[in-house]
């Protein structure tokens, strides 16, 4: 049996290829994929060769949605993180962007949710994991730097706690969508009103700065914006070495956290089902897998008109 898969052939080159689907092992599920959500940051770093664990060729992606055709949970719509790789391809923790996925672990999607509503279930889990141990709560103020999927979903989680969220991003499209769905106030980073608004609302500094940009040069800003004993949450992925002015961070008794991975999928799905977070409204591009080469090139270029990207395999 053959199927299609998105393959990173080498750095900066993605193709839709026909691959041989392996024989199903006992306990595995054969999933007919309906759609796969893209995690722009992680997948772009892999596409450009900057994720250190990437070996070539590889199948990217870790957010798959589909219907089980054979094996346990047959007939159920599920979410999964990876399908088993074709023979001869180096193993990786990703591997969701496949038309037919052999899956060992999957979670059933609650009734009433369609594939697009849960296409970014793992990024919802990333947001939940990043804020799990935070003490921030009702009446507090947070600044979210970078309004991609992770930034906006973190903002939604914070708002569900009663936090006032201010977001910043250079992309006009991301600011508009964030203002509609994710934050209480939104600015371009270089907008003078950004600093003025914070100075009026929280003259002693914000309770949390949450960064998703992946830019280590912003570390002075993180420290500047927080109040004494404020939180800095690094929700991006930072390929360059991070240098922090210890004296200033030490003086403010900064709490700096570097979360990793995501909360269990059933937790993320329940947040989606209960409408506490809305990832579907953040989808800007729903495209055929055959357009993967163009789409990853756009993401790698930092196209400001992209936010949520979904490959539709139907």
Image: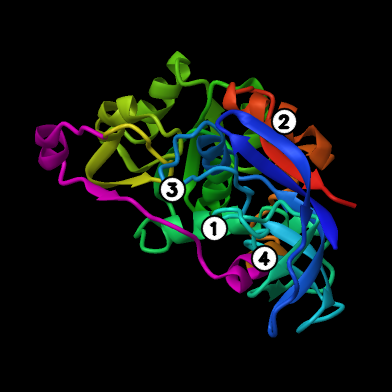
Q: Quadrant of the N terminus?
A: bottom right
Q: Which residue is mark 1?
A: 91
Q: Which residue is mark 3?
A: 53
Marks 4 and 1 in Cβ contact (< 8 Å): no
The mark that comes first in sequence, 1 or 2, is 1
Marks 1 and 2 in Cβ contact (< 8 Å): no
**Is 185 displayed left or right of 72 in the figure?**
left
Work out how far the residue at label 4 is from the one at label 1, CA to CA, in angstroms.
16 Å
Determine the secondary structure under disc 4: strand
Colour scheme in use: rainbow
Closer to us: mark 3 or mark 1? 1
**Is 143 displayed left or right of 68 in the figure?**
left
Determine the secondary structure under disc 3: loop
The mark that comes first in sequence, 3 or 1, is 3
Q: Write the start and end of the magenta stretch as one range.
A: 242-270
Q: Where residue 148 sits in the image (x, y, percent)?
A: 58, 37
Which disc, if any, is residue 80? 4
Magenta-drawn stretch contains 115: no
Work out how far the residue at label 1 is from the one at label 2, CA to CA, in angstroms.
22 Å
Q: Which residue is mark 2?
A: 293
The mark that comes first in sequence, 4 or 2, is 4
């Amino acid at each position: 049996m053959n199927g299609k898969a998105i393959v990173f052939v080498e750095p900066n080159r993605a193709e839709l290829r026909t691959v041989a689907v392996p024989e199903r092992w006992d306990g595995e599920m054969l999933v007919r994929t309906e759609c796969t959500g893209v995690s722009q940051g992680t997948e772009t770093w892999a596409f450009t060769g900057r994720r250190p664990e990437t070996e070539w060729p590889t199948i990217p992606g870790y957010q798959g949605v589909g219907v089980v055709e054979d094996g346990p949970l047959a007939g159920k719509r599920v979410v999964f993180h990876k399908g088993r790789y074709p023979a001869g391809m180096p193993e990786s923790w990703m591997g969701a962007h496949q038309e037919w996925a052999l899956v060992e672990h999957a979670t059933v999607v609650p009734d009433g949710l369609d594939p697009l509503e849960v296409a970014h279930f793992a990024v919802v889990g990333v947001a939940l994991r990043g804020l799990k141990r935070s003490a921030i709560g009702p009446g507090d103020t947070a600044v979210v730097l970078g309004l991609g999927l992770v930034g906006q979903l973190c903002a939604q989680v914070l708002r569900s706690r009663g936090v006032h969220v201010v977001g910043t991003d250079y992309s006009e499209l991301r600011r508009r969508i964030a203002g509609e769905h994710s934050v209480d106030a939104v600015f371009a980073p270089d907008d003078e009103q950004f600093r003025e608004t914070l100075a009026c609302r929280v003259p002693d500094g914000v309770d949390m700065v949450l960064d998703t940009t992946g830019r280590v040069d912003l570390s002075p800003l993180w420290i500047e914006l927080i109040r004494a004993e404020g939180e800095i949450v690094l929700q991006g992925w930072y390929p360059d070495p991070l240098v922090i002015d210890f004296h200033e961070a030490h003086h403010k008794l900064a709490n700096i956290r570097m979360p990793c991975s995501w909360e269990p999928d059933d937790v993320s799905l329940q947040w989606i089902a209960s409408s506490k977070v809305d990832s579907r409204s953040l989808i800007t591009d729903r495209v055929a897998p055959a357009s993967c080469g163009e789409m990853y090139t756009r993401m790698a270029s930092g196209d400001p008109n992209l936010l949520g990207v979904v490959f539709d395999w139907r």
